[in-house]
Amino acid sequence: MSTKTRGSGVESRLLDLLEYRGIHGAAITTSDGLLVANGALSVPDAEQLVATLIAMDSSNGSKPHFWDIESEYGSICFVSGNDLRLIVLSEPGLDNDQIRPILIDHLLDIEHMIGL
């Protein structure tokens, strides 16, 4: 096996997000907070981030949506899909109108890929 493999298809798709300028890490979770995969985050950090953001999400299973939290140090984007959630860490000041459709499409592609 090559040492350059990226792991599962989901992990590979998360690592694809890192190719976008300004994105530093990502995680996929179930709607109840179970970590599915992460990219460029340690597992403990990803689990803590996921648990915190799932607790903050007030959608209660409503239709897919997007929200973000930004500070002078960075931004966290939360994308809710049909069954999964995508959490992305990025530089501050990313254009939400530009990044939102990319992240939503990425999440929906992952859901389709794993058959949800």
Image (tube, helix red, strand yellow):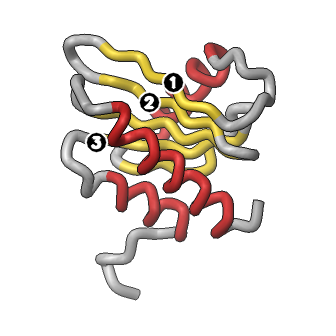
Image position of 36 with respect to 44: above or below:
below
Marks 1 & 2, CB-CB < 8 Å contact: yes
SS assignment at label 2: strand
Identify the residue at image location x=33%, y=41%: 98
Cα distance in 3D space between marks 2 and 3: 10 Å
Q: Are marks 3 and 1 in contact (CB under 8 Å)?
A: no
State the image coordinates of residue 33 (x, y, percent, origin top left): 69, 32
Q: Where is 92 relative to 71, above or below?
A: below
Tell me residue 64's x, y (percent).
67, 37
Q: Observer-nearest residue: 14 or 58?
A: 58
Secondary structure under tag 3 reads: strand
Give 78 or 102, whichever is nearer the viewer: 102
| Dot 1: element | strand
Question: Residue flagged by tag 2: what amino acid is it?
Answer: Cys
Picture coordinates of residue 41, whole percent (x, y): 38, 41
Q: Residue 34, located in which quarter of the rendered image? A: top right
Q: Nearer the viewer, mark 3 or mark 1?
A: 1
Q: Which residue reaches farthest front?
A: 97
Q: Is residue 28 above or below residue 106?
A: above
Instruction: Residue 23: give its label.
Output: 3
Residue linked to disc 1: 67
Q: How far apart in space, not on screen, are marks 3 and 1 (Cα)?
A: 16 Å
The disc at residue 77 is 2
The earlier-in-sequence mark between 1 and 2 is 1
Amino acid residing under circle 1: Trp
Residue nearest the viewer, comparing 68 with 26: 68
> Image quadrant of residue 80?
top right
Left or right, 88 with respect to 115, comes to left
- Residue 52 against residue 41 in the figure, above or below: above
Amino acid under disc 3: Ile
